[in-house]
Amino acid sequence: MATNPTRDQVADRITEAITAFGPKREQVVPEATWAQLGLDSLHLVELAEIAANDYDTELKGEDFEGLVTVGDAIEMVWSRAQAPTPSSTGPGEG
C-alpha cells in the first residue's frame, strides 16, 4: 500500500472482513468481543491474513487471539500499518 491508511479506513476494512464471517454490520462495533460475534480462532487467522495482505504488514492469528474486542484489533492493525515494513536484509539472516 503506497500510503498509510487512516484509522477509519482500517475500521471499515476490518468490519467488512468480519461481516463476511456472518455477523451483521450493526453487531460489529468496537466494543464487540470475538465471542459475542461468534468468531473462533480460525476466523481470527483469516482476519489476520486479510489485514496482512491489505496493509502489507506481518500479522498472525495469534496476534488477534490476544485481543478482546474489535476496537483492539482495529488499533493493532492501524498501528502496524503505520510502521515501515521490515526489509529482507535484517540482522541475523544468512
Image (spheres, helix red, strand yellow):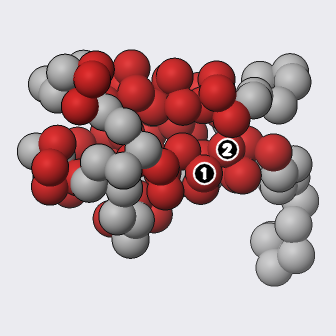
Q: Which mark is residue 59?
A: none
Q: Amino acid at mark 1?
A: Glu
Q: Nearer the viewer, residue 66 or 6?
A: 6
Left or right of 79 on screen, residue 73: left
Image spot of residue 39 (x, y percent):
16, 46
Helix, strand or loop status at disc 2: helix
* Farthest-out residue, bottom: 92
Structural crowding at the residue carrying mark 1, measured as other residues with C-alpha within 10 Å and reported as few (<14), some (14–19) or many (≥20): some
Q: Quadrant of residue 92?
A: bottom right
Q: Amino acid at mark 2?
A: Trp
Q: Quadrant of residue 86?
A: bottom right
Q: Which mark is residue 78?
A: 2
Q: CA distance from mark 1 to mark 2?
A: 5 Å
Residue 57 seen from this side: no
Q: Are discs 1 and 2 less than 8 Å apart at CB?
A: yes
Q: Is residue 35 above or below residue 18?
A: below
Left or right of 78 on screen, residue 30: left
Q: Is residue 71 above or below residue 29?
A: below
Name the residue carrying label 1. Answer: 75
Image spot of residue 33 (x, y percent):
26, 54
Quarter of the image with the N terminus is top right
Residue at 72% in and 52% down: 79
Residue 86 seen from this side: yes
Residue at 45% in and 31% down: 14
Q: Nearer the viewer, residue 5 or 89?
A: 5
Quarter of the image with the C terminus is bottom right
Helix, strand or loop status at disc 1: helix
Structural crowding at the residue carrying mark 2, measured as other residues with C-alpha within 10 Å and reported as few (<14), some (14–19) or many (≥20): many
Q: Nearer the viewer, residue 47 or 32?
A: 32
Residue at 49% in and 56% down: 72
